[in-house]
Amino acid sequence: MIVKRMRETSDFSNNLSLRQRSGKYWRIAFLAATIIGILALSALIINIVDSVLGYVIVDSKINPATLAVNGIELEEQSSEQWIQLLKDNLSSGALKKLEEERPLLERSRKDLYFLIETRVLRYEVLETWSLYDSLFRKAEIVNEYLSIKKDYPGAQLQFKSWINGDLVVRSQSSEASTAGIRTAVLGSLWTILFTILFAFPLGVGAAIYLEEYARDNWLNRLIQTNINNLAGVPSIIYGILGLAIFVRALEPLTSGALFGFVDPTTANGRTVISAGLTLGLLVLPLIIINAQEAIRAVPQSLRKASYGLGATKWQTIWAHVLPNALPGILTGTILAISRAIGETAPLVVVGASTAITFDPSTPFSKFTTLPIQIYQWTSRPQSEWRHLAAATIIFLLVLLLCLNAAAILLRNRFEKKY
Amino acid sequence: MNLISPVLETHNLNIYYGDFRAVTDVNIQIPRHKITAIIGPSGCGKSTLLRAFNRMNELVPNTHIEGEIIFEGQNLYGRDIDPVEVRYRIGMVFQKPNPFPKSIYENVAWAARIHGYRGNLDELVESSLTKAALWDEVKDILKQSALSLSGGQQQRLCIARAIAVQPEVILMDEPASALDPIATLKIEELMQSLKKDYTIVIVTHNMQQAARASDYTSMMMLAENTRSGTVIEFEETNTLFTRPKDKRTEDYVTGRFG
Amino acid sequence: MNYGYPIRNKGLQKKIKPGETVIHVLLFLAGFISIFTTIGIVFVLGKDAWLFFRLPEVNLWDFLTGTSWQPHINKFGILPLFTSTLLTTAIAMTIAIPLGLAAAIYLSEYASQKARKIIKPTLELLAGIPTIVYGYFALTMVTPLLRSIFGANIVEIYNTGSAGLVMGILILPLVASICEDSLSAVPRTLRDAAYGLGATKLEVAIKIVLPAALSGISAAIILGITRAIGETMIVAVAAGAGPNLTLNPFKGAETMTGHIVRISGGDLSYDSIDYNSIFAIGLFLFLITLVLNIISQRIVRKYREVYE
Ligand SMILES: Nc1ncnc2c1ncn2[C@@H]1O[C@H](COP(=O)(O)OP(=O)(O)OP(=O)(O)O)[C@@H](O)[C@H]1O
Ligand SMILES: [Mg+2]
């Protein structure tokens, strides 16, 4: 503290120590707010990881041990033996349906074993625990297991990772222990494909127009304001729009009927292409705004240099502006696409299917997507579906993280340039 | 040169940006109630030295100093010294006018208020603006945004703002570089009138300004091998401009005048 | 004199370049699509909402003032849906505004460069997590937490409190990030000026930087509110099904967005009263967010003027 002061009679009270002290308290408060925010968001991640691993008690209708033939365990038996097993246990109708989908003899071992698990053994999850409980309340779990075993002698206690290789490979199933997300992953990919095909060219085109061509008149200002507004419209409104336009009004197109496309499972416009276009409309303003920023960041001197050599406007844009803006445009597009991949509400409204077990194969297929799958599984009251939802969330988050990492890498390369 | 009761004196002062030593081994004394000019070529560390006087440098991350700066008998960089208190006692005016986006009145009153001014704020604002030779131009528009003033007016407002706190020293970093000759002249006159109450240290690129307006001049120069600046000559302005001791000072001072 | 170039025109008159014109027109159309989107939204929502209000069972006044939404007995009052939207939004903003703003101040004024470089992108990443994930979080973690704190007989399994809290956590990074942007956009010279006058860090942050960034901050808050009102999946998962006129955050109550999702989740038959009603609710929602958007854009534009 400086004590000696030239003008001894100061006009200022200047109680600095008080000011500094309140400064310190507030600093702590600001820091605390930041930490609380980070903690809350970490809790979200922890909660999901907590649900993805843990003990489960599963029971099967038929104990696999009883199916051993001549001392050969079920898992080690030949494919022919498995097929025989299926023939012994399934009704002829069910068999015929399976043969129609794909002849049993042509199926892989993995596929066959999956059929045995779901159709013959029929595993059922009786009880599940979170990772925390599994780690710290092992004794209670074992007790519970022993009491359950009285009613279900075949019940087994296993430590299960709900996220595993099978999750991505398997399709929907009515039993949590054998259900997978293949259909949803493919549905998401198909949908996003159409979103990109629709929104990327249009978005970049609009951005070029607004940045390079548009003069400052009422129409162009209206377009710009309108785009900014659209970016703030709740996504569910886009769902309603998609429902009315793509699903209903354009049904002949989006159901494929107009192209003589007769998919027995497609009776209406609630298809992959409708969903993709709906999400396309949703992310279009985001792509435009991001692309505009990237184009604006290209130095004016570059354009002048090009014009100075007698290039036309489009030549200038094509040869100089776009190549330099491209990393920025791509970054923005990737971010917009990851938004689309995570969107749920508009697709519910557009009519994602609740339970489909076959993979989408054309633009006119019915579909489900990852977030929809999460939504449905979360909404079920039984805990095993929640675990499955958590596993799907992890898958989705990792996917989005990869996309974001790509965007960040691109952005970093972009920033170095200027 | 030994001055009676200097306000500020530096002892073997080195100033660093990270590992880079921008200013080396400065030993000068700033005399009380005088105007001291710091001159020298661009990049030689004038602003850096000036900002060290009220610890503004430490707002830049990774800066540190060696040596000491003594203000009224105390080391400004001593362990229990509060930089806020330092800046309260040693004010600063910046190269580019930087009024707050508030009204003209608020610009002047703001700091007085945070420091717990006990007197009449209106009077303080009026007297500060008057001292800064701005009162007549703005007395009717005190409530207007300070950003609506011209550059020269804004700079005088920044000076008024600095004097309202009644500091003991005012540091000015090229306060007139963004202004036209008339506004520059006004600022110089202003400095003369402020001299009786305040000690002023001013960085300038303008030789004429230094010669015209200052009592003492400190000549800084980059060392040839280290790219680090230091004070090579510190003299009464008259002496430094007419009979420089150092050959480099002579070249610099005369070079500018042709 | 042409050395390999095609013959040049003698004059310098404008030449019509068809390629350039075509491109210009195409690009204009791309820009114009957005107008079609808006027209589409207004038309689609308007048309079906019109069909809805023309039904004998429905009238606009009862829609806006009716206190119960029970389609099976022809009661179509939006208040229960609207109130729970407001309730969840209010809870969310009570969390998001103070925490988000405080975090933004910390990041922009106090945190080291390094900390900011890590925390800011992390926040942005978290803001990009799909909202269904937040819905999962609300239902499987926050609701049980609330029930264990306040008692399972008081807190229903589906409740607006949990949805609102989690919505606040969702919006927090958004508010923090935009506020941080506008705080750090305040020029350094302003801070220097205040420090040079002997202000403490807190005084600089609160009395100089914050007011200078106020318009950006208000825009962030409005954006947060818009986001909360339009937020769907969290409330669809955690806030409960079934309209319920209550301000009790421990009770389940359906919001406007939650209702739309539930109704359209089943296979909805066209031109049914349910089908038309989601358009009426959608229109209402659209108008609210439109007004908020326009306000925030006004503010942002004003703010640009100050700095340029
Ligand atoms: N924030 C900073 N970080 C790192 N180095 C800096 C910083 N500010 C200044 N420097 C360096 O310190 C040296 C002195 O800079 P300073 O601004 O003090 O020079 P100056 O004499 O005021 O120049 P001018 O007359 O151009 O204003 C220069 O080499 C400069 O590059
Ligand atoms: Mg300088």
Image (spheres, rainbow, N blue to C red):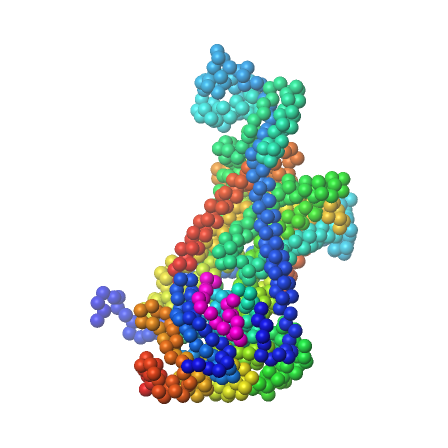
- The location of residue B63, given as percent across then percent down, is 45, 64
Q: In which quarter of the image is residue A54?
A: top right
Q: Magenta stretch: dominant SS?
A: strand
- The location of residue B135, given as percent across then percent down, is 59, 85
Q: Residue at x 34, y 83 (%)?
A: B245
Q: Is residue A258 visible in the rendered structure shown here?
A: no
Residue B55, above or below B36: above
Between A151 and A142, the one lying in front of the other is A142
Q: Is residue C120 visible in the rendered structure shown here?
A: yes
- The location of residue B226, given as percent across then percent down, is 33, 68
In magenta stretch: residue B71 = yes
Q: Residue furthest top?
A: A70
Residue A93, above or below B79: above
Q: Quadrant of the C terminus of chain A?
A: bottom left
- The location of residue B142, given as percent across then percent down, is 63, 81
Question: Which stretch appears magenta?
Answer: B61-78
In magenta stretch: residue B143 = no
